[in-house]
Image (spheres, rainbow, N blue to C red):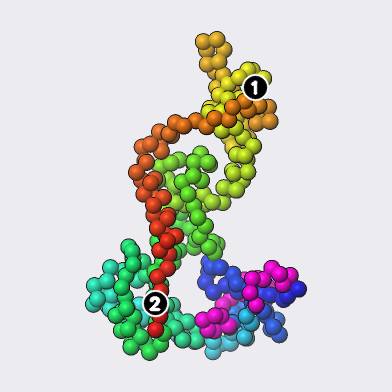
Amino acid sequence: MKNIVGVRFKKPGKIYFFDPGKWEVKKQDKVIVETSSGQELGEIAISKRTIPEENLKAPLKKVIRIATQKDLKHDADNRKKEKEAFKICEEKIKKYKLKMNLTEVEYQFDNSKILFYFTADGRIDFRELVKDLAAIFKTRIELRQIGVRDEVKRIGGNGVCGRELCCCSFLGNFETVSIKMAKEQTVSLNPSKISGNCGRLMCCLKYEQEVYEEKLKRLPKVGAIVKTADGEGTVDSLETLKEIVRVKLKDGDDTFYKKYPATEVKILKNIEKKEIDPEEKEHMKELEELEKLEKLDKETNTQEDEI
């Protein structure tokens, strides 16, 4: 068993485990920790607890100390320097006529490195820019290309639900989202209704996906031929979460629809209806473009250069 504390460097952001050592820290305490790229200031997000060592992926780095007033002042000074560095970098981007949009500058706590985050369509040759910045700031410079989701996460805002964006309030990592999820959850296939502020598919499509996948395994497909207490019919639609099946039945020349619990329906032939949803057909090109952007985000997520 191993003692750990969870430290977060940005809010929201991923929580990392550290060895608290001799320090008695509690939630929201500011601490200085050792990371792979140097010392950083973080906040305790998970108070001290014990977990099995086999659950740890790598040896834990240690909490160096609880942050002092001097540490907090140094961190505040870095925030001021970041604003100045932002202006300088923007001027250099204009000088070299680079097609990139600077979004944020981050000073590492020990000033051993400055990170410049930017967005761009495709890859950028920023070698001359890096050399200029290194000459000005006399430290290591790292440029990181981020996606539009990361950009919106830094800008902030509210979603269509009226609440603060998930990526700005609690999401630590971005999960893969697909059009298939929207289809399985029978939500609108209009891109304007299933896209977030970033122009990509809404992250919340992922939240219930596992539940839908589990329930859909137990349900017949739309278009399947089934046997009911009222005879054979064709599955017309599903209420997935309630596990209710709507069946199209015939009584002579008349056609009628009736709902049944999935447990009261026997599948005779599990054929999936091949008809394209009218809304999907109307927005086919936009949906294909969304899927293409999702793939591009995965492939060109980060571009880095260091001095």
In the picture as drawn, the residue positioned furthest to the top comes out as 252
132 in the magenta segment: no
Instruction: Identify the image quadrant of the N terminus.
Output: bottom right
Residue 100 position, x and y percent, is 31, 69
Which residue is disc 1 drawn over?
228
Residue 56 is covered by the magenta coloring: yes
Q: Is residue 28 visible?
A: no
User: Which region is colored magenta?
Assistant: 34-59
**Residue lying farthest to the right in this orientation:** 1
Task: Say which mark, if any, is on residue 305.
Answer: 2
Q: Position of residue 56 (x, y in %)?
A: 67, 71
* Location of residue 122 by image quarter: bottom left
- Circle 2: element type: strand
Whether residue 273 appears in this view of the structure is yes
**Mark 1 or 2, nearer chain start:** 1
Q: Report whether 245 appears left or right of 152.
A: right
Query: What amino acid is at disc 2?
Result: Asp
Q: Residue at x 54, y 51 (%)?
A: 206
Q: Amino acid at mark 1?
A: Thr
Image side of residue 13 versus residue 197, left or right: right
The residue lying at 65 percent from left, 77 percent from top is 59
